[in-house]
Amino acid sequence: MSEEHKHVRHDEHDEQPAPQPTGRQRLVAGLWPPRASRAQLTVAMLLFVLGLGLAIQVSTTSDNGGTLRGARQEDLVRILTEVDNRTQRLEDEKHGLETQRSELQSSSDQAAEALKQTRQKEQQLGVLAGTVAAQGPGITLTITDPHGSVAADSLLDTLQELRAAGAEAIQINSVRVVAATYFTDGSDGVLIDGRRVSQPYVFKVIGNPQDLEPALNIPGGVVQTLEKEQATADVVRSQKIVVDALRPSKQPDYARSSSR
């Protein structure tokens, strides 16, 4: 065999094909380094935020459920009764509005009926605005704070609970509570609408006593919270509560009625 042929065969023997990657190597090469588009990253972030929100909600629900599971049977019945009472108050308010509409539509003298309803509404708004005195059944809540541990937010929580239970008029010591009432912590005590109020804090509340008192005594409610702050809350029902602290009637500077 010639030298030329030997040389050619030798070169062909040296050029071996490159080994093919295994299946595992191809899988690793496809997964790493990760290649993600902007849209995929956005979707992943949204899914993460959604999952985090669901986890927090489940945790909160579990905590509330644990509180109710630890409550006594009579406490659970009281909570259910309070919810039913709130529903009934809304139904009564709806029925009252429907009755007023029917009386206005069926009255032979609609002008006189409208004037009557307007005066009634004016009286109701005066009570809500604190410009007129009010009386009726309700409760007196006295909060005694010998250690000075009750802050403004605790009094605000108490007020909100009373409102949710159907309180129609409230007076705290000598301050009439209205929709714009606010609480702040001052250097020398709690301020209500900028006025210093010393303890004991006496809430005079007009409303249904059977709704107001249980709302304060629900598990984890106002009374238990105040007791944790080493304060005491005494609730007394009464068929006649007088709320006589008044607010000055203010006329708006710029707003005018749009009715014609």
Image (cartoon, helix red, strand yellow):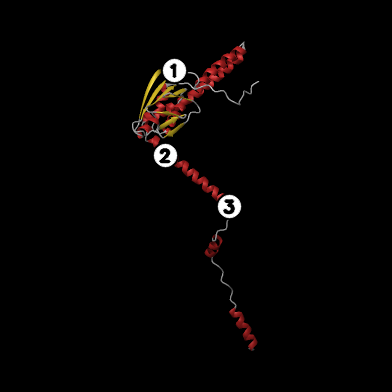
In the image, what residue type sits under mark 2? Asp
Residue with the most extreme bottom position: 2
Disc number lying in front (1 or 3): 1
The residue pinned by badge 3 equals 40
In the foreground, 98 or 126: 126
In the image, what residue type sits under mark 1? Gly
For the residues labelled 2 and 1, say whether their Cβ atoms are less than 8 Å apart: no
Quarter residue 219 falls in: top left
Q: Earlier in the sequence, mark 3 or mark 2?
A: 3
Q: Position of residue 191 (x, y in %)?
A: 44, 30
Q: Secondary structure at mark 3?
A: helix
In the image, what residue type sits under mark 3? Gln
Q: Secondary structure at mark 1?
A: strand
Mark number, residue 63:
2
In the foreground, 108 or 192: 192
Q: Position of residue 13 (x, y in %)?
A: 59, 80
In the foreground, 120 or 252: 252
Describe residue 99's horizontal placement relative to residue 65 as left or right: right
Mark number, residue 136:
1
Q: Position of residue 91 (x, y in %)?
A: 51, 23
For the residues labelled 3 and 2, say whether their Cβ atoms are less than 8 Å apart: no
Q: Residue at x 52, y 46 (%)?
A: 49
| Quadrant holding the C terminus | top right
Describe residue 197's horizontal placement relative to residue 248 as left or right: left
Label 2: few (<14), some (14–19) or many (≥20) C-alpha neighbours in 10 Å: few
Compared with 58, 234 (above or below) is above
Q: CA distance from mark 3 to mark 2?
A: 35 Å
Label 3: few (<14), some (14–19) or many (≥20) C-alpha neighbours in 10 Å: few
Q: Earlier in the sequence, mark 2 or mark 1?
A: 2
Describe residue 35's horizontal placement relative to residue 147 as left or right: right
